[in-house]
Amino acid sequence: MRKPSADRVLTALMGLVSLFVGASLALVAYVLAGKIGEDHRATLDRRVTAVVFDKRVVNEGGGPNGGTRTDTLVRYELGDKRYTSRLRRGSSGGEVGDTVEVAYDSERPDRPYTVAYAESEPPSDASRITGVVLFSLFALAMLGGGALLLLTGGDL
């Protein structure tokens, strides 16, 4: 029996890697497609008054998209339970000691959002659709390339 050449082994390995990457991209496209039209803002149906107890400047790293952001930390009570959390999706504009209204999902009261975010328009689905199309195209290219490498052994 003939031993496969190093080129054939490398080609088969590249084909398998390509198939794996293609399948992974297809899975990502499937997950993204399921999120089209979904917006969790509708579940932010409750409001509570919270106290701003800290503001922290967070360094987001260097580069063109780096910089800093200010996290607002709030405390609030619901029934007999007290919550302390970072305010999500923007800043309340309040200073330490101020009271602010926050929105939360009744099933996740530990995750407060700004009321401005809860009442804003949801983003367009165009970016999600574009993502699904691009991931699908890349997945097809990787799957096709991987299958071609495995079937032909690199001899075209």
Image: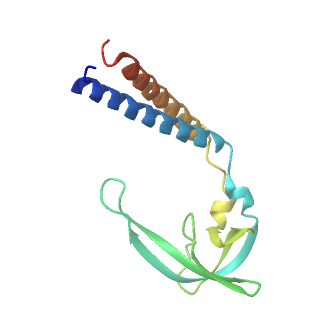
The colour scheme is: rainbow
- Relative to the observer, which residue lies in front, 138 or 121? 138
Judge whether 57 appears above or below 136 on screen: below
Residue 74 location (% of width, % of height): 58, 80
Pick the quarter of the image with the N terminus. Answer: top left
Say left or right for 96 vs 104.
left
* Location of residue 83 by image quarter: bottom right
* Location of residue 87 by image quarter: bottom right
Question: Which residue is outermost to the left?
Answer: 6
Residue 151 location (% of width, % of height): 40, 18
* Location of residue 81 by image quarter: bottom right
Q: Residue at x 53, y 81 (%)?
A: 95
Question: Which residue is outermost to the front?
Answer: 1
Pick the quarter of the image with the C terminus. Answer: top left
- Relative to the observer, which residue lies in front, 86 or 149? 149
Judge whether 118 appears above or below 2 on screen: below
